[in-house]
Amino acid sequence: MARSVRELRRRRPEVFERLGSVAEAVIEIAPTDLPVRFRLSLIDARRPVRVVGRNAEAQCAARIAGPLPLLLAVLDGRSDADAAFFSRRLVVTGDTRTVVGLHNTLEAAELAPADLIGAPPALRRLTNALARRGLGWFDGRGAVA
C-alpha cells in the first residue's frame, strides 16, 4: 500500500500538491470489518501508510470508518461518499475540514483502482476492470448498499 502511494506521488504529483495542508495531517482509515487500521501520513514520502491494530492508541487529525468494500467503492468513485456519510455507513471523527479536503482532492483527481495499485500503463485497463469486478462481487453480497 505504501508503495502504491509513493508510485501515485510519482505519477500524479498534482494530486498531492492540491492537498495543501491536508497532506500534513495524519488520517486513519478504519475498516470496521478488519482487525487493523491504516494511518495515512501523506507528507511522509518514505512511509506514507502504516498498518496498526484496531485498538492501537495514537493521535490522528481524523478517522474515517466503515466496511472495507464501502471504503474502496468510495475511493474508486463507485459509491457516493456524501451519501455514505449522511446515511451513517461511513463514520467520520476528528477534524472534518481535513476529511473534506481529502474528499475534494480525491474526487477532483478521479482516481481509478489502477492509480491506487500502481499498475503499469499497459495493465491499467485490465486492473481497473478486475478491481471493479471484485467490488461488484462485494456489492452483490450486500456489502456496499
Image (tube, rainbow, N blue to C red):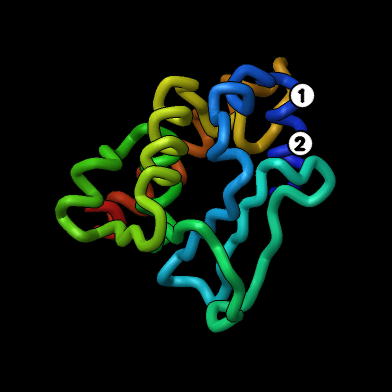
Q: Is residue 51 visible from the viewing direction of this image?
A: yes
Q: Percent position (x, y) of residue 45?
A: 79, 41
What residue sits right under mark 2 in the picture? 6
Q: Say if 71 sits above or below 13 in the image.
A: below
**How crowded is the residue under tag 1: few (<14 C-alpha within 10 Å), some, or many (20+)?**
few
What residue sits right under mark 1 in the picture? 10
Give how far apart the Cα atoms at labels 1 and 2 are: 6 Å
Cβ–Cβ below 8 Å for labels 1 and 2?
yes
Decide which of 92, 22 is in the foreground and name it. Answer: 22
Q: Say if 143 sits above or below 45 in the image.
A: below
Rendering quarter of residue 113? top right
Q: Say if 103 sits above or below 50 in the image.
A: above
Q: Which mark is residue 99?
A: none
Q: Percent position (x, y) of residue 36?
A: 57, 72
Q: Percent position (x, y) of residue 40?
A: 62, 52
Decide which of 84, 92 is in the foreground and name it. Answer: 92
**Kind of residue sitting beneath label 1:** Arg
Which residue is at a point 59% across and 80% down the rendered structure image? 57
Which residue is at a point 26% across and 38% down the rendered structure image? 80
Q: Is residue 73 visible from the viewing direction of this image?
A: no
Q: Say if 3 sits above or below 53 in the image.
A: above
